[in-house]
Amino acid sequence: MADGKDRRIAELEAELADLRSQYEHLGRHLETQVQMQSEALHESEDRFRALFNSLQEGVCLLDADHRLLLANPSAQVYLPILTSVGVGGIVHTVGDHRLADVLKAEEGQAAHEVVVKETPERIFEVQGYAVGQQTKDEGWVLVMREVTREREVLERIQLRDRLAAVGQLAAGIAHDFNNILGVIMGYAELLEMREDLPEKVRRNLQVIYLQSERGAQLIRQILDFSRQTSAQKQPLDLVPLLKEVTELLERTLPENIQLTGDFQPGEYVLNANLTQVQQVITNLAVNARDAMPDGGRLTFGLSWLEVGPGERRPIRTFSSRVPLALSEGKWIVFLVSDTGIGIPEDAMARLFEPFFTTKQPGKGTGLGLAQVYGIVKQHGGYIEVDSEVGVGTTFTLYFRSVAETAVAIEPMNTAEIVHGEGEKVLVVEDDPAVLEVIGNLLESLDYLPLKALNGREALDLYDIHGKEIAALVTDVVMPEMSGVELALELQKRNPNIGVVMITGHPVAKREDSHIPEKIHGFLEKPIEFRELAQVVKKATTKS
């Protein structure tokens, strides 16, 4: 009996030991599972935290009472700009929007745009999402994203498209419009040469000429701004050019404006078109003059800026949102500063837009600074503007320096009108009115013009007169045979014939391998009498 009881106790003890072993094994298994789950949870939390912290968008978690519980690093950067609330505080507004309005947005609705009036201005898109699908009692997720750079890129694309449209329009009408102006200006000059002309009629002709010249300048300004011009460039030193322009301005600016120069020693050579750079300087000077109705000081400055290898020097652009930067190299810094009325802040962003002006009606077309902008961009340069209302404005232009010898600058508008000696000049122009006025102008210069409406007629005339023809004056853009093709054909027959190209279409003046090598000059429509005289004299003079 005792033995049976002992065996039973032993069996129970064995079962208990087995159960204890199973329990311990289960405990270890559960402990392992808990540890694995805990590690997985920590890994998931780490991944979530890394993802949360790496988001470029600012993400905030708000409770149902709009208390800020959590903010990722991007949000921590944006929050001081958009709201004064930190973690633990209750958010009432985001920028100039009530938070309640932001959170009311329906799913799929565009984000709220928040504009922060800083310098420079910054733009954000903000949107709120309920944490729970069925209820908003669980809280909110607030997402904020800065879109300043995106808007800047979009504005640049839109500006580029506007420029392209303006350029296409201007290029389309430039040729015909310049032909019309050329005829008006040509006959006005021819009539003004008459000695028996009454003084009142002479004054009226001068008005006709000046107004036509103004129309031609407007076309030129639009083309320059839209970068539809293709002027030839050459190494140009700004110092002698500025000295010459300064002498001219001293005679034309009001006496109550003091003109000064501040040039660091040295040569300031850039690859540029002389006429266009003169236009830039003149436009900026005229703009400064208009900004100083009661007098003041206009200063031209020249200095150097070296940008080292791998460096970039930021430029404060007129758009002011996304700064540009000067790349490595030596840059010419050209400064034009005035002590005038200054530019209002709300006008700065539109400063270089065509037809935008802060001047009174009749005081400006809004194309002067637009032309400056277009020319500077064509030369690979940059413009920086600093202005304070009531203090003055400074335009700083940056051009890349070139290590070349500058060409000599001829005095502006001082050359005498030179005449020919009865040489025959073949004139080719498909517009009959323009052909007639050029012929008449050449006759007044003592040349014998032979007129043709197209290339075929010109070749027929050459077959008749041969080498008696001293020079060819031809329009570039013509039907059937272009002026370039005509010049090449005539140079085959007579390599010594002088060639003068006339263009009223900007794309026709581009440098390319098809333009004849021996060209004595380009004349842009509308043709100026003095320039026509100089170029044709050069073309008919045998070297």
Image (spheres, grey):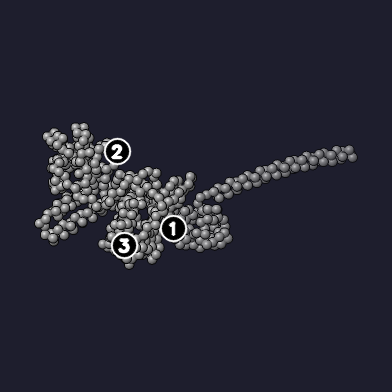
Observer-side mark, 1 or 2, equals 2
Residue that appears at 37% across and 43% down:
404
Q: Tell which circle, 1 or 2, labels the residue nearer the N-terminal end.
A: 1
Q: Which residue is mark 1?
A: 121
Does any portion of residue 365 appear in the rendered image?
yes
The residue lying toward the viewer, choosing from 335 and 415, is 415
From mark 1 to mark 2, how far is it between C-alphas?
Answer: 44 Å
Residue that appears at 52% across and 49% down:
55
Q: Tell which circle, 3 or 2, labels the residue nearer the N-terminal end.
A: 3
Three-letter code for the amino acid on which mark 2 is drawn:
Asp
Q: Which residue is mark 3?
A: 290
Q: Position of residue 497 (x, y in %)?
A: 20, 37
Q: Residue furthest front?
A: 543
Q: Tell which circle, 3 or 1, labels the residue nearer the N-terminal end.
A: 1
From mark 3 to mark 1, how far is it between C-alphas?
Answer: 29 Å
Observer-side mark, 3 or 1, equals 3
Three-letter code for the amino acid on which mark 3 is drawn:
Asp
Q: Which residue is mark 2?
A: 512
Q: Position of residue 162 (x, y in %)?
A: 32, 50
Left or right of residue 230, residue 304 in this image: right
Q: Position of residue 308 (x, y in %)?
A: 48, 46
Residue 262 badge: none
Kind of element beneath mark 2: loop
Neighbourhood count class around disc 1 (C-alpha, 10 Å): few under 14, some 14–19, many 20 upward: few
From mark 3 to mark 2, how far is it between C-alphas?
Answer: 41 Å
Q: Position of residue 157 (x, y in %)?
A: 37, 49
The residue lying toward the viewer, choosing from 10 and 342, is 342
Kind of element beneath mark 3: helix
Kind of element beneath mark 1: loop
Which image quarter is the C terminus in? Answer: top left
Residue that appears at 78% across and 39% down:
18
Neighbourhood count class around disc 3 (C-alpha, 10 Å): few under 14, some 14–19, many 20 upward: some
